[in-house]
Image: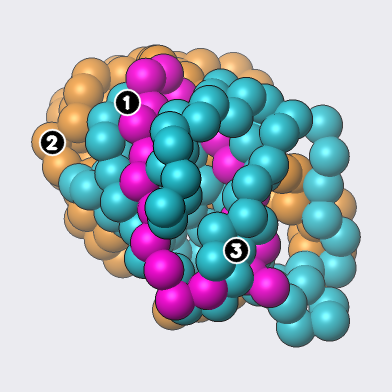
Chain colours: A cyan, B orange
Amino acid sequence: MSEFNNVTIVREANVYFDGKVTSRTVVLEDGTKKTLGVMLAGDYEFNTDARELMEVLAGEMQVQLPGEEWKTYAAGESYYVPANSSFKLKITGVADYCCSYL
Amino acid sequence: MSEFNNVTIVREANVYFDGKVTSRTVVLEDGTKKTLGVMLAGDYEFNTDARELMEVLAGEMQVQLPGEEWKTYAAGESYYVPANSSFKLKITGVADYCCSYL
């Protein structure tokens, strides 16, 4: 297990796609924001404002980044999503992730 | 929105019932433990070690506490679950909750 210390966490969940994707917002001491989330089986598309680092904590994600082929990321792997863009995901099991807003 | 400050959060999710119930563990400055979780539609039963305070943050929960009738708790309401017992839940939508281990 890994953890974030001395952070602020927003109690209320962020809920998307009827709860198939949910996350909690965490603000670190330096003010940077992350979300810790879970994606259940399904196909999703998300837009980005800031550039994002997506770390797969458990499970796996099939991801299509803008202009790229579909690629599978497993637990321990990560990918960057450009700012002001969108990315598609196909989830088959349960994916646990950490998203950092850069 | 409400928040917890100066806490530790475990990055990896707690996953139950194939992801239909997931939560994150939060440890407060005084060492007390809480989980922030989401329950999707389904019927569940959980056991308790410590006495628990369950606060419904969003959505609603139908709950059967030990030896009691089924009762519905909506957002803003809460209930205690005795230590070393179990409780049943029926969730119809998406329930967001905070569990405090007392």
Q: If the image is split into quadrants, where does the C terminus of chain A sit?
A: bottom right
Q: Is residue A94 magenta?
A: yes
Q: Which amino acid, mark 1?
A: Ala
Q: Kindly identify the residue that appears in the image at 53 percent across and 26 percent down.
A: A72
Image quarter in which the N terminus of chain A is found: top right
**A55 or B93, which is in the foreground?**
A55
Residue at the bottom extreme of this rendering: A31
Above or below, B62 relative to A86: above
Q: Is residue B81 left or right of residue B95?
A: right
Q: Which of the two discs, 2 and 1, sits closer to the camera?
A: 1
- Residue B22 is a magenta residue: no
Residue bearing the label numbered 2: B92
Picture coordinates of residue A36 (x, y %)? 59, 51
- Mark 3 and mark 1: span between their CA atoms? 22 Å
Which label was assigned to residue A52? 3
Q: As rendered, which of B35 and A72 lies closer to the eye?
A: A72
Q: Residues under labels 2 and 1: Cα distance?
A: 19 Å
Q: Nearer the viewer, residue B67 or B61?
A: B61
Among numbered discs 3 and 1, the one appearing first in the sequence = 1
Label 2 close to label 3 by CB (< 8 Å): no
Q: Which residues are magenta?
A: A83-102
Left or right of A33 in this view: A15: left
Relative height, residue A42 to residue B9 (above, below): above
Report which quarter residue A7 is drawn in: bottom right
The three-letter code of the residue at mark 3 reads: Glu
Q: Are marks 3 and 1 on the same chain?
A: yes
The chain that hosts pointer 2 is B
A44 lies left or right of B97 = left
Classify B14 as above or below B74.
Answer: above
Residue beneath the point at 78% across and 63% down: B7
